Amino acid sequence: MSDNLGSETRPLRVAIIGSGPSGFYAAEGLLRSGLRVKVDMFEKLPPPFGLVRYGVAPDHPKIKKVTRVYEKTGKKEGFEYFGNVNIGEDLSVEDLKQHYDAQIYACGAQTDRQLNIPGIDLPGSYTATEFVAWYNGHPEYIDREFDLNQEIAFIIGQGNVAMDVARILAKTVDELKNTDIAQYALEALAKSKVREIHLVGRRGPAQTAFTPPEIKEFGELAACDPVVKPEDLVLNETSRQELEDPKFREKKRNYEILKGYSEGGTHEKPKKFLVHFFRSPIELVGDGKLEKVIFCKNVLVGEPGRQKAKFTDERVEIKGGLFFRSVGYRGVPIEGVPFHDAWGIFPNTDGRIEGAPGFYAVGWIKRGPSGVIGTNKADSIATVKGLLADLPDLIPCPKPDTGAVSEILKTKGVAVVTFADWGKIDAAEIANGKKVGKPREKFVTVKEMLRVIEK
Ligand SMILES: Cc1cc2nc3c(=O)[nH]c(=O)nc-3n(C[C@H](O)[C@H](O)[C@H](O)COP(=O)(O)OP(=O)(O)OC[C@H]3O[C@@H](n4cnc5c(N)ncnc54)[C@H](O)[C@@H]3O)c2cc1C
């Protein structure tokens, strides 16, 4: 029994692994619980904020302002940030057990789902994950190269990530230069020869997963026209029913926007954004590098709201040398934490990780890669509620001491980045950005970041 956990004499000690939105919402929930809580947040990279920094598109800066809320949490009493600490490598789950009464995993979905088709590994075929991380200056992706000498690019998937990739390829340098895009990416994109961007979805125009502002933006770009063929917008009876359901209001709005694109436009701009439906790539073909993609045409089958794409015998080939797959993210295992391989998450019931008392999950590692930043708030609070309800059953850790954790990291030679250190990195990035008209110029290597702190 541990009925004194959370008291003045024995604060509840929680380790949060990951500093994205779900981690910060969990921290805030714990710090507002009314109990005495010590929250230590571990993040493998020096900077906090997860996909808000390394996923959200650079040309959508307003969305990133949510970090101001997290900064307030980061400065609260009882909160400590351990940046540049990889759980599973620098500290083990067993180490954490020694020093924390509970562990909340907020480590997101760090990798992409596979698309197992012939030719998928040909040069010229990439994941959206790596392209997004590259243009956002993620230290683990700065050395990636993408063949932007190609004129025709394919993006497989119809969610907002696919739209981000398409838009970054479609925009001019002038449209991107005042964003926090990594400088090397801006330079590479300035030389890009991509002229046709094909966004390909396996289902139809009534099943799009992107949100209306993202598709609308393609009608407002400086050098790119959206192109939609009217025959791609033909709906079956079930899809018509779906669009009348108020639950699918956003999809209906998407459909109307797509219809607008199909009805005209002069198509005089140098780049084209072509949206295709009812197609799945089945083979990537090329001699040493990608030269063309073979698509299978699909039909939809199933109940309203649950229609699935079914392959037909019809094939379509399109020539092109650049291919991005954006077919979903998945989590990666951490030694000592149960992992559901098929779902790519830490298996849990309402945030309680199965078979691991005292272990909890929030965000994308809890429910899979769905939802916007705000979705994580209610989700994290629900997990924190469960944790607090479990308090009487939690086994107090044997060594409730953050100093001892710092000592282990010091012995291992890990350069821990505190929240105050992050403040210095943040200020230096903003100052560097100011010189070139950007909101910030990100440091893209851990070395550069650590140098700022050492000054
Ligand atoms: C490309 C892209 C664009 C998006 N754009 C938008 C948008 O415009 N608007 C919007 O509302 N939502 C957007 N989203 C969704 C939003 O980013 C997610 O809902 C949200 O980031 C999920 O939060 P999370 O905390 O679960 O994971 P993440 O944000 O991924 O955070 C996980 C953190 O855990 C850290 N970590 C992982 N493993 C370890 C470890 N072993 N040890 C220590 N730390 C670890 C990671 O480095 C990372 O910082 C976008 C998502 C993507 C992929």
Image (cartoon, grey):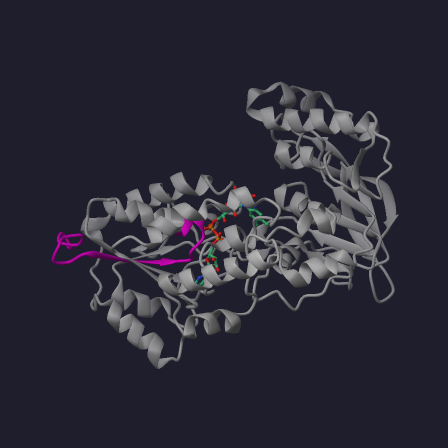
Above or below — where is 428 with respect to 169? below
Is 283 in front, or is 430? Answer: 430
Q: Quadrant where the C terminus lies?
A: bottom left
State left or right for residue 121 relative to residue 425: right
Q: Is residue 217 visible?
A: yes
Residue 231 shown left or right of residue 253 in the figure: right
Residue in the picture at 18% in, 56% down: 11
In the current view of this chain or complex, which residue is farthest to the front?
435
Task: Check the picture and name the quadrant holding the N terminus.
Answer: bottom left
The residue that appears at 76% across and 57% down in the rendered structure is: 190
Using the image as rendered, state which of residue 314 and residue 185 is in the foreground: 185
- Percent of width and height locating residue 356: 34, 57
The image shows residue 213, relative to residue 454, as above or below, that is above
Please tell me whether residue 131 is drawn above or below residue 200 in the rendered image: below
Residue 361: tell me if it is visible.
no
Region rendered in magenta:
1-23
Residue 268, percent across and down?
87, 37
Q: Please identify the dominant SS of the magenta region.
A: loop
Near-viewer residue (269 or 174) = 174
Q: Is residue 281 above or below residue 123?
A: above
> Residue 96: x, y in percent?
31, 66
For residue 235, which quarter of the picture? top right
In reply to whether residue 294 is colored magenta, the answer given is no
Residue at image x 63%, y 23%?
A: 242
